[in-house]
């Protein structure tokens, strides 16, 4: 089977890769590009641990082929911090202990950042429904929701 | 003079809430979990699994697979050690089937290939011929006389004569004369309860990367709760010398007991030995559900007698646990936890460990206890309703306290059940008004907690900072807790301490991170190792000052002369001692190893409000409060996190999570789509109250907290739903259809 | 597997017609990729239609209706304020499918062609009277969406045929639609029962009514009798009872891991009532 040549942009950097047509974007990120921040929790779009954005749209990278990344702009958890400056969400997640094992954290951060870009002032219910596709088994979500709400409040004040 | 830093008050670091040391790595995506490691020349593996619940394996032919592009090795049972006995044999049989596939998903062969896709394609090309055998997946059916025998001769000596060969272990305990106790009661309620198997549901599938040479030397990286156990088991299953296999624990993406067992690591190593290359093996989510350990499913009968004033006169329970196709269902834990919260004159509990054609059960957060609490606390709730008694007052009246003879034998030392009940009663939640359609439930829960083999090393650096090597994988923030406890003893800031999880070559044996043992046992060992280092620091100061060692004491990071008689010396800071330690006697480190046995038990009381839609049977948990004894909360935020996580898992177990098997014995919901763990929009905020009744067995009073939090929820929610629906729910999960059926039959009856 | 990204529907049809083995069209991929991962289906040919011009557009038509491109995602529908004002039930039905992440990819057309009896958008589309334009080797035709699913995982589309657009009728001034589903959790589940209702009114009197049910039969069911039961009257208790009875009578469900026959049938009646009330309130609101 011949491989496909794909040119894309990941966290602002131009990237080229070859992939099997069956490989998902998640497979490519993890196994070809060494970007292991996105996790495979299920491979079927049920857990959100592989969340990335594609042209600003939140998706599961396990539900998209690597080939479909052609010409797109992909953002992963590795691109959330700017240099040594953490994103406010990253800081709040540490401060609130909004993570225990941390396996769901990259996906939740990508999803929560995408939410706050679209809705800077979400209600608790909106945060819970937005993140319903990001399974967390450790925390009961309590501290995650609080961290997102507090980050939103802080970012609103700062802006 | 042995240093003793024991205390229960006056902490400077313990009880504060600093940032976790692994936080930055985990929010930036660079923390390395099981599947995140790579090695030069690495192959990818996949496992061929039985689609049948019970089948004799007639033939395995890998000829076509081996001929495929990129395929480097295939292993079957023949590639593992022979002649194993006991639990090692059970584990091997589970890791790779021998003559018979015992459950849907049982491994029968494995492939290593140059890409993950090539490995996946190759397992499809492995041909396996099966002779399908009769199967059984239900616990009561597996005990029935006509049930197919999973494996003859698996029962141990505890099993009374005349039981089906699928009953493999039996437990009985208690005291007094329950019949006499029931005769004293004003009301006796006996009821039957059923719970389905649930899965720990950690989001990270099992993953490992192994290298093993024909020289018998190996390296293994894996996500596990206990890498020394992995080392020991892999060595046995592959016929290696234990010390020749070095195992490193990755960051672990959740375990909850499910990563105490060994499933894929020996397979990766066997493939590596055969291909002579590193092999990475990562389970799919479907494999996690089908072939790792869920909990036992249960069938239970509980009978309790009560006087009109709420005094329990006698209690009796029979607990049948289905544990999959191998012995090991925690029937004795279920039985022993069942009535532990209560001071009972007459009590008897019986447990059965029953095999069925399902995956080998594994520990899940307080294994066996939540189910027992569901049955017992439901009956107590019903007694309170019928006798018009307050459920918390009634529990307080019967509560186990210091000096009470426990239902399973020992006499309780200082315990905190009464304190959790009193805190629950005083909590605004307990007296808040309910909306129409809502019901409130409460329940107590109990877990033993555990000590276990533990070894910790602490090394001081030249600049007066400390590095600590512990051997218990960090599954809930334990690196932060260890650093806090070490700070307390060394008197240096939390930030000056780095804690790592050492590999198996770097420390003595460390038991698995299980039994809520880490903050207790590794914590105790960390304190003792720090004391060991402090002792040496004091000795160096004493030598410098030319005074006896016992004339020096340690305070807030300084060596100080113990009084005017010792001499007039300025306090010597740690960094000054360590700066010259090479010239004053060599490196300074502290060490401790032991099997501590003073793990204090933990009790909890939960309050929950649930709302039931009587038209659809749908339940919404609207308010939840956890009250639990932590002994001493070393990092209160992480203690809260454990309380909340346990409650959330309990909510899932109570309402929607279950293993669903078809008539064909195949698992029908091996994915997060239909194995329905709670999502963010399902849950309310989960309120927590940390009660601190110090554990006399730990220098700072710590009790394990990780597991008790899942003991009360099943019963608390069942009691809330039963109150809201006006009908007693006796089977879990309380999915909507089951609630509607109960409402229907109540209306008919 | 061969992956193609044609620039026109004609090329897509030619590729599908000319290929051997299993062919799948790829829009959002939220079903196709799951089937590939679970080894249920591995297509020999996968035709990505997202590079075809117009497939990402939601366009108001001259008659007041809407043309929805086959690659339009649920998220794009949700963000389209005007479409949501006209057809809130349809948009909500699409929005209920999967997570926020799935919404970033999943499409109405994909939900239709996956042919799951439990597809959330399908009862809402049927109730709304949505039609599909289909292009294939034999030319182009337009059919009501209810004619497309043929059974679980099966459609009436012939080999080489592809849906090129969906058409939502004009809302008019006094109409409202709604869709409700029952799931055990609050999100992320497959519908145990789904119900779409579309009403138009004059004052309090219903002038037009369509109800469709999902997950209660091998394909979504258009409850034809709902029209007769509701038209010419208001949505009073009698009408609601009649509608619930009709819903229950239209059910031909199975017992499976997601629900029993009895449960599904009962809940279909409950949802028929609840959904109709919302649609009626919306129609009355629109009439103001």
Image: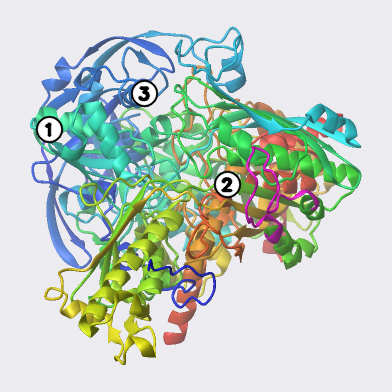
Q: Is residue B711 above or below residue A115?
A: above
Same chain under badges 1 and 3? The reply is yes
Q: Which of marks 3 and 1 precedes in the sequence?
A: 3
Image coordinates for residue A103, horizontal then vertical, percent = 36, 54
Q: Which residue is mark 3?
A: B106
C275 or B558: nearer the viewer: B558
Q: Which of marks 3 and 2 precedes in the sequence?
A: 3
Residue name at image x 60 percent, y 29 percent: B298
Q: Which of marks 1 and 2 precedes in the sequence?
A: 1
Is residue C8 something one can see in this rendering?
A: yes
Dot 1: within a 10 Å radius of its alpha carbon, few (fewer than 14), some, or many (20 or more) residues?
some
Q: Is residue A126 above or below residue B615?
A: below
Q: Is residue B638 above or below residue B552?
A: above
Question: What secondary structure prevails in the magenta region?
Answer: loop
Labelled pair 2, 1 in contact (Cβ < 8 Å): no
Q: Which residue is mark 1?
A: B216
Labels 1, 3: front one: 1
**Number of marks drawn:** 3
> Which chain hosts label 2?
B
- Which of the numbered marks, if any, corresponds to residue B447? 2
Q: Quadrant of residue C204?
A: bottom right
Q: Quadrant of residue A81?
A: bottom left
What range is drawn magenta here?
B397-419
B149 or B738: nearer the viewer: B149
Residue B212 colored in magenta in the image: no
Most extreme residue toward the front, as rendered? B565
Tell me the distance, in whole angstroms, between the alpha carbons under discs 2 and 1. Answer: 41 Å
């Amino acid at each position: 089977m011949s491989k496909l040549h794909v040119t894309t942009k990941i966290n602002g950097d131009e990237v080229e890769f070859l992939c099997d047509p069956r490989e998902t974007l998640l497979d490519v990120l993890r196994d070809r590009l060494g970007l292991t921040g996105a996790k495979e929790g299920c491979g079927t779009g049920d857990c959100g641990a592989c969340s990335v954005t594609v042209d600003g749209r939140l998706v599961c990278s396990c539900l998209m082929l690597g080939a479909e990344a052609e010409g797109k702009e992909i953002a992963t958890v590795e691109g959330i911090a700017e240099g040594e400056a953490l994103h406010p969400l990253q800081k709040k997640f540490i401060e609130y202990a909004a993570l225990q094992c941390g396996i769901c954290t990259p996906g939740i951060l990508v999803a929560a950042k995408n939410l706050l870009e679209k809705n800077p002032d979400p209600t608790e219910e909106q945060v819970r429904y937005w993140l319903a596709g990001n399974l967390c088994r450790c925390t009961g979500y309590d501290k995650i929701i609080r961290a997102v709400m507090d980050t939103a409040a802080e970012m609103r004040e700062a802006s | 003079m042995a240093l003793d830093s024991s205390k229960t008050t006056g902490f400077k670091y313990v009880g504060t809430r600093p940032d976790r040391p692994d936080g930055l790595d985990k929010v930036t995506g660079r923390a390395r979990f099981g599947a995140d490691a790579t090695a030069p020349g690495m192959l990818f593996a996949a496992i061929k699994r039985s689609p049948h619940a019970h089948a004799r394996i007639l033939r395995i032919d890998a000829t076509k697979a081996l001929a495929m592009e990129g395929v480097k090795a295939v292993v079957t049972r023949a590639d593992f050690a022979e002649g194993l006995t006991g639990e090692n044999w059970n584990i091997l049989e589970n890791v790779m089937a021998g003559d018979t596939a015992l459950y849907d998903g049982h491994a029968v062969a494995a492939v290593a290939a140059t890409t993950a896709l090539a490995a996946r394609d190759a397992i499809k090309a492995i041909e396996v011929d099966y002779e399908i055998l009769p199967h059984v997946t239900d616990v009561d059916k597996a005990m029935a006389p006509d049930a197919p025998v999973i494996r003859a001769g698996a029962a141990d000596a505890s099993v009374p004569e005349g039981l089906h060969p699928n009953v493999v272990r039996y437990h009985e305990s208690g005291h007094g004369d329950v019949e006499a106790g029931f005769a004293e009661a004003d009301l006796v309620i006996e009821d039957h309860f059923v719970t389905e198997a649930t899965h720990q549901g950690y989001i990270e599938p099992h993953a490992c990367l192994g290298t093993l040479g024909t020289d018998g030397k190996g390296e293994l990286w894996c996500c596990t709760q206990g890498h020394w156990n992995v080392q020991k088991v892999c060595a046995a299953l592959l016929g290696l010398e234990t010390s020749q296999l070095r195992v490193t624990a990755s960051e672990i993406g959740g375990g909850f007991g499910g990563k105490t067992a060994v499933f894929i690591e020996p397979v990766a190593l066997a493939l590596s030995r055969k291909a002579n290359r590193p092999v990475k093996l990562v389970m799919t989510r479907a494999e996690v559900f089908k072939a790792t350990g869920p909990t036992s499913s249960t069938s239970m009968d509980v009978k309790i007698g009560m006087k009109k004033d709420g005094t329990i006169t006698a209690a009796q329970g029979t607990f049948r646990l289905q544990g999959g196709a191998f012995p090991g269902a925690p029937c004795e834990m279920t039985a022993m936890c069942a009535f532990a919260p209560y001071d009972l004159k007459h009590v008897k509990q019986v447990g059965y460990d029953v095999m069925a054609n399902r995956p080998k059960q594994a520990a899940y957060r307080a294994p066996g206890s939540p189910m027992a609490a569901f049955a017992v606390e439901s009956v107590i709730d019903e007694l309170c309703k019928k006798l018009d008694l307050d459920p918390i007052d009634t529990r307080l009246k019967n509560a186990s306290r210091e000096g009470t003879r426990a239902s399973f034998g020992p006499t309780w030392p200082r315990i905190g059940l009464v304190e959790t009940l009193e805190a629950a009663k005083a909590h605004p939640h307990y007296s808040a008004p309910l909306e129409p359609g809502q019901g409130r439930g409460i329940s107590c829960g109990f877990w033993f907690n555990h000590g276990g083999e533990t070894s910790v090393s602490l090394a001081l650096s030249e600049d007066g900072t400390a590095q600590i090597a512990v051997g218990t994988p960090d599954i809930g923030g334990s690196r932060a807790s260890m650093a806090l406890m070490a700070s307390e003893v060394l008197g240096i800031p939390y930030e000056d301490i780095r804690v790592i999880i050492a590999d198996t070559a770097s420390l003595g044996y460390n038991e698995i991170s299980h039994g809520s043992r880490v903050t207790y046992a590794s914590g105790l060992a960390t304190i003792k190792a720090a004391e060991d280092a402090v002792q040496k620091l004091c000795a160096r100061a004493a030598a410098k000052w030319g005074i006896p060692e016992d004339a020096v004491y340690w305070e807030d990071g300084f060596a100080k002369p113990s009084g005017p008689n010792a001499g007039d010396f300025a306090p010597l800071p740690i960094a000054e001692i360590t700066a010259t330690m090479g010239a004053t006697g060599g490196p300074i480190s502290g060490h401790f190893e032991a099997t501590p046995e003073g793990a204090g038990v933990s009790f909890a009381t939960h309050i929950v409000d649930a709302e039931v839609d009587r038209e659809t049977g749908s339940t919404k948990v609207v308010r939840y409060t956890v009250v639990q004894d932590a002994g001493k909360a070393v990092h209160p935020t992480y203690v809260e996190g454990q309380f909340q996580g346990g409650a959330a898992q309990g909510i899932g177990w109570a309402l929607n999570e279950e293993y669903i098997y078809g008539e064909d014995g195949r698992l029908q919901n091996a994915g997060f789509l239909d194995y329905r763990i709670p999502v963010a929009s399902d849950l309310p905020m989960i309120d927590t109250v940390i009660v601190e009744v110090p554990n006399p067995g730990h220098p700072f009073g710590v009790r394990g907290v990780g597991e008790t939090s899942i003991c009360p929820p099943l019963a608390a929610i069942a009691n809330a739903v039963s109150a809201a629906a006006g009908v007693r729910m006796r089977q879990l999960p309380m999915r909507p259809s089951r609630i509607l059926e109960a409402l229907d039959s109540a209306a008919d009856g | 597997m061969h992956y193609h990204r044609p620039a026109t529907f004609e090329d897509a049809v030619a590729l599908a017609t000319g290929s051997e083995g299993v062919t799948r069209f790829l829009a959002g991929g939220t079903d196709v990729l799951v089937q590939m991962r679970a080894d249920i289906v591995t297509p020999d040919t996968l035709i990505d239609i997202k590079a075809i011009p117009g497939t990402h557009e939601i366009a108001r038509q001259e008659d007041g209706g809407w043309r929805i491109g086959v690659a339009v995602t649920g998220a794009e529908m949700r963000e389209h304020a005007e479409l949501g004002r006209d057809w809130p039930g349809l948009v909500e039905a699409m929005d209920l499918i999967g997570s926020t992440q799935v919404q970033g990819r999943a499409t109405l057309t994909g939900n239709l062609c996956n042919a799951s009896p439990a597809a959330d958008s399908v009862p809402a589309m049927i109730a709304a009277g949505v039609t599909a334009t289909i292009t294939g080797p034999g030319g182009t035709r337009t059919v009501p969406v209810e004619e497309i699913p043929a059974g679980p995982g099966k459609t009436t589309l012939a080999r080489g045929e592809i849906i090129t657009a969906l058409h939502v009728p004009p809302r008019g001034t006094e109409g409202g639609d709604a869709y409700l589903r029952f799931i055990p959790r609050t999100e992320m589940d497959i519908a145990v029962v789904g119900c779409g209702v579309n009403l138009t009114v004059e004052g309090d009197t219903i002038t037009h009514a369509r109800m469709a049910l999902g997950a209660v039969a091998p394909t979504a069911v258009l409850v034809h009798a709902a029209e007769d039961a509701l038209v010419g009257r208001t949505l009073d208790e009698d009408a609601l009872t009649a509608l619930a009875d009709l819903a229950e009578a239209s059910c031909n469900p199975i017992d499976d891991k997601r629900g029993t026959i009895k449960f599904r049938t009962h809940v279909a009646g409950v949802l028929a009532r609840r959904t109709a009330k919302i649609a009626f309130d919306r129609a009355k609101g629109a009439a103001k």
